[in-house]
Amino acid sequence: MALIGVLIDEMFEDIEYTEPAKAFKEAGHYITHIGLRKGQLVKGKRKRTLVKIDQSISEAKPESLDAILIPGGCSPDHLRGEKKSIKFIKDYFETGKPVFAICHAPQILITAQLLEGRRVTGWKSIVQDIKNAGAIYVDQEVVEDGNLISSRGPRDIPAFTKASLNKLETI
Amino acid sequence: MALIGVLIDEMFEDIEYTEPAKAFKEAGHYITHIGLRKGQLVKGKRKRTLVKIDQSISEAKPESLDAILIPGGCSPDHLRGEKKSIKFIKDYFETGKPVFAICHAPQILITAQLLEGRRVTGWKSIVQDIKNAGAIYVDQEVVEDGNLISSRGPRDIPAFTKASLNKLETI
């Protein structure tokens, strides 16, 4: 069973966290919430889902995780404004372990300059940012490129969750 | 006296709208609120400031405006997800008239591919997006490049407003 780190901050898109997390837990996997401050409660933007941060991003160990889930909403924009988030995601990417990124999640990967030459999708408002980052934008419900699985937004959650679960079975 | 179009949608950064708008009105200028739907009430993300949309972005006439103000927050991300906003800002830019862009506002200009070679600043989270768009990112409170005046965020509002008012005096 895998330990999945959820990178999350205020105003995440609720169902992009709750639905994949529920499916991961039902499949027997474990979740740890990684954010800016340990013990902080962060809230979803629509349904006000509350999430307690288990580990601060400056203390989290990439090698202790088996995969990462990045929900969308305004959360990725908040996280990528902090250098410690960028350091963490760069270190994590070096391990080659899976990243499940949905909606606005690629924003963090753009700031960390990790998308050059990668096939990726994301929310419609960030398409030009994805292209400008040197990535190949693909307009489909789920895009898999090596360790990176991405989806466009809430409507793609079933396909995103399925592809993520399949990936977890291979590790 | 100038007519200033404010491009605005849900969850704008309140004071990036209220403070410049107040200063513009005190100087005798006029404000018209341009958004996705005429008559819609949009709300600020912190203080819940309410703004009524006077003109829909698909009907607004770039040639009828003397300047544009784009407040930050989540509003620019919402606007740039709609093709009609991108068409409007492209048409407006062709007039060469002033654009006052603060915080996340450059996101709209990135999607409209208007920043290549321009000197611009913006909120810390979008710095890499600005650079990837081919712009020259400048880390200062206000950056003026031809018709484009930009600032980083709330702390820069006094300098941003002053530079914008000075620009309005030249037209």
Image (cartoon, coloured by chain):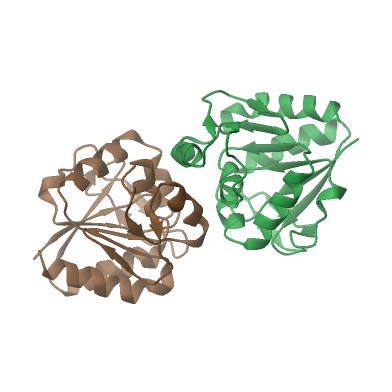
Chain colours: A brown, B green
Q: Is residue A137 left or right of residue B55?
A: left
The quarter of the rendered structure image containing the N terminus of chain A is bottom left
Q: Is residue A81 left or right of residue A69?
A: right
Q: Residue furthest right?
A: B1
Q: Position of residue B136 (x, y in %)?
A: 53, 30
Residue B46 seen in the figure = no
Question: In the image, is residue B171 above or below residue A155?
Answer: above
Q: Residue placed at 43% from the left, 52% from the top?
A: A130
Q: Position of residue B100 (x, y in %)?
A: 70, 36
Q: Residue placed at 70% from the left, 35% from the top?
A: B19
Q: Nearer the viewer, residue A144 or B52?
A: A144
Q: Position of residue A6 (x, y in %)?
A: 26, 55
Q: Nearer the viewer, residue B135 or A41?
A: B135
Residue A29 seen in the figure = yes
The quarter of the rendered structure image containing the C terminus of chain A is bottom left
Query: How many callouts does the rendering have?
Result: 0
Q: Position of residue A103 (x, y in %)?
A: 41, 61
Question: In the image, is residue B123 above or below residue B46?
Answer: above
Q: Is residue A4 left or right of residue B94?
A: left
Q: Is residue B120 left or right of residue B128?
A: right
**In which quarter of the view is residue A5 placed?**
bottom left
Q: Nearer the viewer, residue A150 or A45?
A: A150
Q: Residue placed at 33% from the left, 76% from the top?
A: A158
